[in-house]
Image: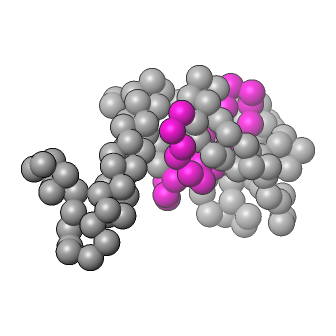
Amino acid sequence: MQSLKSLIRSTSRSLAQAAKRIEERETAELVQRIGAENKCKISPKGRDSTLYLKSGKFATVLEVRRETLLCEVYKRQSLQPFYSEPCSSDLLNIFSLKSNVTGSIKEVAAASIQCKGLKLPHGNGFLIPLLHQEEA
């Protein structure tokens, strides 16, 4: 009974509050498990939301689901090299987004994540995979 009581923060809508707290815990456990598998923190908010997939595509996490991540996945055709001198940045998987590009919404499994990525605000944004991962 004490564990249920700790899930409730106010007297109104007690059942809804408890259900929401349980869902938050399950989501946090999934994010922690996916992050531990990939040795990085993954979140649908801010700097922890960009991923580089094993397929060579970049993805932005929109929502964490029970067993997968709902992501906006960018195709290679929607990306262009960020620089071309002294060599093309696509050799290093560094790209800028073409104008007005939206990716397709797909579910992504944890096994398909190669590493965390970084999306920086320059023009429409540019994407780079991170070689070094945080230890979870």
For the record, the magenta segment spans 44-67
Q: Nearer the viewer, residue 92 or 115?
A: 115
Figure check: 126 above or below 16? above
Q: Nearer the viewer, residue 23 or 56?
A: 23
Coloring basis for residues: one colour
Is residue 33 in the magenta section? no
- Horizontal arrangement in the rendering, residue 42 relative to residue 109 (left or right): left
Figure check: 13 above or below 134? below
Is residue 52 visible in the rendered image? The answer is no
Figure check: 28 above or below 102? above
| Outermost residue to the right | 77
Is residue 56 in the magenta section? yes
Residue 9 position, x and y percent, is 20, 68
What residue is at 73 percent from the left and 43 percent from the top?
A: 106
Q: Nearer the viewer, residue 16 or 23?
A: 16
- Horizontal arrangement in the rendering, residue 23 relative to residue 53 (left or right): left
- Horizontal arrangement in the rendering, residue 28 relative to residue 14 (left or right): right
What residue is at 68 percent from the left and 53 percent from the top?
A: 126
What residue is at 32 percent from the left and 62 percent from the top?
A: 15
Residue 13 position, x and y percent, is 31, 72
| Outermost residue to the bottom | 12
Q: Tally the marks.
A: 0
Residue 69 position, x and y percent, is 58, 41
In which quadrant of the rendered image does the C terminus lie? top left
Residue 92 position, x and y percent, is 70, 33
